[in-house]
Amino acid sequence: MADLLDLLEKTSRTFALSIPPLPEPARREVTVAYLLFRIADTFEDATHWPPADRIAALGDFGFLLKNGTEAEAERFGQAWTQAGVSRHAGYRELIAETPFVFEAFRSLSPEAREILRAHVTRSAEGMARFVARTGPSGLVLSTLDELRDYCYTVAGIVGELLTELFLLEEISLRTVAEELRVRACAFGEALQLVNILKDAEDDAKEGRRYLPASVPREDVFALARRDLGEAGEYIEALHGAGAPGGIVEFTALPVALAWAALARIEEKGPGAKIGRAQVLGITRRVRSAIARGESPALYDRTLSGDLR
């Protein structure tokens, strides 16, 4: 688990904060799920590769998920590493450790493994469809529906996967199963929209224009706020059903950070980030609310510092 967490810390600051509090076996399952999604994301983001190579890598990745052997994971991992899939040091290390990640995947319970396989495969296949749309000027989304379809592919499915893992491991949550499933996509969409708004300028330089030119930016901010509100309802359902504090924290912390990030982006524009001190302060306040038996979702904007 220590090696998996090391890879997590090198590939995601937010999830390196929020995953460790999860109870076992959800902690290991979610860690492996994140790393698998991150491998697929790395291929999607490899805009320095021709689209055909990115599509092929996503297809080979899907093959490994379905029935790949240890030797095949080793072979693909070496090939992807040698091809220079990413300029990000953490992502390069993750790709090199593909055999290790798939070994961890195979060690999960059959039920958890099937949940991961089904959802990660759907996401990777969807990513390949978007890569196939890449033109001479990169990927350009034209409508709000296309943006939402993209967010579902790369993040809404993640929300669905997490929900199924929570329901698998925590019997008490099955009383709110439908409530969680209805809001799972909005939860993922909210976090992805905030990232897209934050990284819009950098993404455009890399040939990814997720924000449709015909859609007022205010409409995207409004959608993100609505989705974050639904994410708060998701967290409240978890808390009300008696979810372990680690699961509540895992879901509440990214949402509180997203509220703060959204306020910062609205004030300063794309590229603006919340500082380390604010991240630590939000983390302390989320954990304090949970320790008192309160739901952070009741005042997540206050926890994040977004008092408007």
Image (spheres, grey):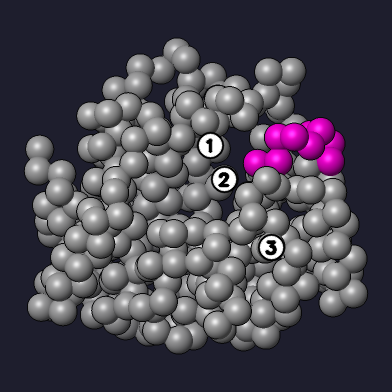
Q: Is residue 87 left or right of residue 229?
A: right
Q: Is residue 252 left or right of residue 289?
A: right
- Label 2 vs label 1: CA separation? 6 Å
Percent coordinates x, y for residue 25 in the rendering: 49, 85
Query: Which element carries disc 3, helix, strand or loop?
Result: helix
- Label 3 vs label 1: CA separation? 30 Å
Residue at the spot x=15%, y=48% of the render?
305
Count up the numbered dots. Answer: 3
Locate the N terminus by quadrant.
bottom right
Q: Which residues are magenta?
A: 44-53
Query: Which element carries disc 1, helix, strand or loop?
Result: helix
Q: What residue did someone put label 1 on?
A: 149
Residue at the spot x=23%, y=29% of the render?
267
The kind of residue on which mark 3 rests is: Glu
Q: Is residue 41 left or right of residue 256?
A: right
Percent coordinates x, y for residue 101 in the rendering: 69, 73
Density class for disc 2 (Cα within 10 Å; few <14, some 14-19, many ≥20) is: many
Residue 153 is tagged as 2
Choose between 283 and 66: the one closer to the eye: 283
The kind of residue on which mark 2 rests is: Thr
Q: What residue did someone put label 3 on?
A: 93
Residue at the spot x=67%, y=24% of the render?
138
The kind of residue on which mark 1 rests is: Asp
